Image (cartoon, rainbow, N blue to C red):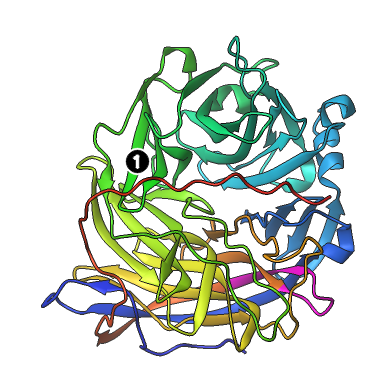
Amino acid sequence: MGLALGLITFGLAAAGAPSVRAQTATIFQNFAGTTYDQVSGSVPPDTMGAMGVNNQFAEFINGSFANFNTTTGTLVSRVSDSTFWQNAGVSSGTLSSGISDPRLLFDAPTQRWFASEITTPSQNNAYLVAVSNTADITQGFKGYTFQANPATGSQNLFADYDMLGINGDGVYIGANNFTSTGSDVSSSILSISKADLLAQTATPASHLFYSNSGGTTGYLPHPITDLDTPQANGKAYFLSGFNQTTVALSSLNGPGANPAGETLTGSGGNISIASNPEPPNAGQPGAPGSIDTNDSRFSGAVIKRNGFLWGVQGSQQNGKAALHWEQIDPVTKTVVNQGFISDAAHDYYYGSIAVNAAGAIVIGYTRSGDTEYPSTYASVGKLGAGGVSFNAPLLLKLSTTAYNAFDGSPYRWGDYTNTVVDPTDSTKFWTIQEFSDTSGHYGTQITGIQVDAVPEACSAVGFGLLLSLGGLGLVARRRIAKVR
């Protein structure tokens, strides 16, 4: 039986504005994904997955590419991530230094899956990009290799934390570049012709834009996945954290089918947000050590829906790790709605957001605290004339064991998750989240959530405030090397 939630809400609404209709939220499917012990994978898993058609949910984490039947919740197939790339035609030599940071999207307009990952030599690494042969994930992929920083004098850099986005013209990857000593020196954007990938052209047209971190693109420029119908052509957006009170918006202008003709446009003035401090490490019961919540970068996919951009950042409220969500108008470069998911007793971290065309919102995340081990949750909300209202956190998978990831406190977690709208039914959402399993290692949980508007109105009792404050310096930290 599913669990239906009532009208307890938290979020954001303007004072005196009409109340926002809440959502009923029913869990209609809930099953285990992959655990560390099943694949002897990496820490962290970099939890990623997407929902396609044919009742297929694909999970892509460090060490594993798995396909699940969403009707039964059963595993259909699983291969290592290196086997996935070799099956797609990438040479074993390219993979010999290691691979990391998997990303996966299902593109409904083209009925294709797109995947990316990075190779992990100490410098001069590559992006791996793949497109599925059909909508059926069992029919395989075609893979490509792109040097991450081919410009003269930049081959000594390491491109880290690849982020994947799609619009009508192109497939895009954003990353930050580090020196061999770990200094964060720049950001880069790879633009690839979507038509060339779909046609499986031998050498797809691509172009790399390279800029100073904190300058044109900000820190870790995250490509936007365009979910509007039709998808935008000729412009691709990128959103990044800039400092504690602003985010940076940049764009590629020009025909994505011919990336060499594109031009990169900077933010031209950053977008003010509510004060967004760096998140502290998360707690768990007893004294097993804290959990690394990373920083205030955008995690999961950043999306465009009904012309607006939506994303989730790590943050801090009440001295605890929190999530800060934002709805941004890319034309006026303003925040339309924003708020925090937080409370005084828990830490919230590694959030991911999905929004359907009717304005239903689901944010999936991990929650823990002094009385709760790392467990998976979602907040279900609704966008309306009065703003955004969220129900109380919906428990997806309760953990009963402290997390211990072998590498010492704070233990690595994340580095991201994903939440998506079902491409065959927009009232259904799917989220893949991470929890501490019975062995004290990580497990992943895949959950289907049905949302429907209810006629009763509710008030938006809020943690989110619309603020416009002065700037503070960017706090960016080098990611700790993964344990393999």
Residue at the image position 38 percent from the left and 73 percent from the top: 381
205 vs 211, left or right, is right
Q: Is 189 in front, or is 200?
A: 189
Residue placed furthest toward the front: 181
Please name the predominant secondary structure of the magenta segment in the image.
strand
Residue 332 quadrant: top left
Q: Quadrant of the N terminus?
A: bottom right
Instruction: Identify the residue under disc 1.
Output: 248
Question: Helix or strand or loop: what does disc 1 sit on?
Answer: strand
Residue 258 shows up from this direction:
no
Q: Is 174 in front, or is 474?
A: 474
Tell me: residue 475, above or below residue 153: below
| Residue type beneath disc 1 | Ala
Mark 1 neighbour density, 10 Å: few (under 14) some (14–19) many (20 or more): many
Residue placed furthest toward the top: 152
Q: How many marks?
A: 1
Residue 336 colored magenta?
Answer: no
Expressed as whole percent of the image width and height from the top left, the position of residue 125 reads 71, 27
Residue 98 quadrant: top right
Residue at the image position 49 percent from the left and 22 percent from the top: 210
Expressed as whole percent of the image width and height from the top left, the position of residue 95 reads 83, 32
Residue placed furthest toward the left: 16
Residue at the image position 59 percent from the left and 21 percent from the top: 196
| Magenta segment boundaries in residue numbering | 436-448
Tell me: residue 412, above or below residue 396: above
